[in-house]
Image (spheres, helix red, strand yellow):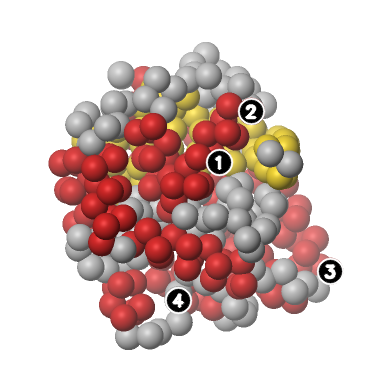
């Protein structure tokens, strides 16, 4: 077990160093928030990366490696995720998380930013963009949550009462998660994820309970009236918006991209062939190119 922990810790440190990241933390309203920040500041406004449900700041390492020479990059661990604080009484709904994310960016003194969000983080980023129209230069949504007009395999599995494939309870669950959420995955990334799952499971650090709490909270935003409110909010986004979606996403149906594009005034979509729910991990090259083009031509 000590060997696995050593391999994982050194592997993550190597990936962070290769991506040009330094781990930092700050306190927001008495709560610890951990984040990664690029050593290089670049010559443009900062990019803030917001991960999805059950994920963490390190999900952005491969993508960030391809962006770090151009931008100051900040990848945040959201509440309840990664190394940031855990509190079962915290309000994890999309709206509350969006409000707290705004406090984080204010505490960091970032000014105007390019905001990128994936899945749950996409819904949160969209809400922030709608309410902070003067602070967001561009918005990039990657397989975003929040609209579920088209049913996915995930929706069908939940209706059948099956175990949530996004929540890891034991080491073997990682195989199901990878198969369900991705269409292709680099071999090195797959090995590191498996080692991480083993370390978490044997160290008693599985986040099953907190992840179930978070998933229940964000599921409350799936109710009809909240879905319609979310759609209305999207129409207030003023920043140029890029919506990236893997065509083989089984978690959130890619057909929802058309609804996002229709509702967000200055938006366009990019659909990726052969990619599932994690485009920034499955094809970081294509995603980084799309983000660069989007942010540099506005």
Which one is in front in this view, the residue at disc 2 or the one at disc 4? 2
Q: Is residue 288 above or below residue 32?
A: above
Residue under numbered circle 3: 2
Q: CA distance from mark 3 to mark 2?
A: 37 Å
Q: Nearer the viewer, mark 4 or mark 3?
A: 4
Q: CA distance from mark 4 to mark 3?
A: 30 Å
**Residue denoted by label 1:** 100
Residue placed most toward the observer, 137 or 283: 137
N-term mark: 3 or 2: 3
Outermost residue, right side: 2
* For discs 1 and 3, the disc positioned in front in the rendered view: 1
According to the picture, the residue beneath numbered tag 4 turns out to be 164
Residue 172 location, x and y as percent? 57, 81
**Residue 61 picture location, percent across and down:** 57, 44
- Residue at disc 1, secondary structure: helix
**Looking at the rendering, in which quadrant would you find the C terminus?**
top left
C-alpha distance separating marks 2 and 1: 11 Å
In depth, the one of 31 and 294 nearer the eye is: 31
The local secondary structure at tag 4 comes to loop
Picture quadrant of residue 155: bottom left
Q: Residue at x 61, y 22 (%)?
A: 109
The residue carrying pointer 3 sits among few (fewer than 14), some (14 to 19) or many (20 or more) residues within 10 Å by Cα, namely few
Mark carried by residue 63: none
Q: Which mark is residue 107?
A: 2
Mark 4 touching mark 3, by CB under 8 A?
A: no
Q: Residue at x 78, y 64 (%)?
A: 5
Compared with 18, 111 (above or below) is above
Q: Earlier in the sequence, mark 2 or mark 1?
A: 1
């Amino acid at each position: 077990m000590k060997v696995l922990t050593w391999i994982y810790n050194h592997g993550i440190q190597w990936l962070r160093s290769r991506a040009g990241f330094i781990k930092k933390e700050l306190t927001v309203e008495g709560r610890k928030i951990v984040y990664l920040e690029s050593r290089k500041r670049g010559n443009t406004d900062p990019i803030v990366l917001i991960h999805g449900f059950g994920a963490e700041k390190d999900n952005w390492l491969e993508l960030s490696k391809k962006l770090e020479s151009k931008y100051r990059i900040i990848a945040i661990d959201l509440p309840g995720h990664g190394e940031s604080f855990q509190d079962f009484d915290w309000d994890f709904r999309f709206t509350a998380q969006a409000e707290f994310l705004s406090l984080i960016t204010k505490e960091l003194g970032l000014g105007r930013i390019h905001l990128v969000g994936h899945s749950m983080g996409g819904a949160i980023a969209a809400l922030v963009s709608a309410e902070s129209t003067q602070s967001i230069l561009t918005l990039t949504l990657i397989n975003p949550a929040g609209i579920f007009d088209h049913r996915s395999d995930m929706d069908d599995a939940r209706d059948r009462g099956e175990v949530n494939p996004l929540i890891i309870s034991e080491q073997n669950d990682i195989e199901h998660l990878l198969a369900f959420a991705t269409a292709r995955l680099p071999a090195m990334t797959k090995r590191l994820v498996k080692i991480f799952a083993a370390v978490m499971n044997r160290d008693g650090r599985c986040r099953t309970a907190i992840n179930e709490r978070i998933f229940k909270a964000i599921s409350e935003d799936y109710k009809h009236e909240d879905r319609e409110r979310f759609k209305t909010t999207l129409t207030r986004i003023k920043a140029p918006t890029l919506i990236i979606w893997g065509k083989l996403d089984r978690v959130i149906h890619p057909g929802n991209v058309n609804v996002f594009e229709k509702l967000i005034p200055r938006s366009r979509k990019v659909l990726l062939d052969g990619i599932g729910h994690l485009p920034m991990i499955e094809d970081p090259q294509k995603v980084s190119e799309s983000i660069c083009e989007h942010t540099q031509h506005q």
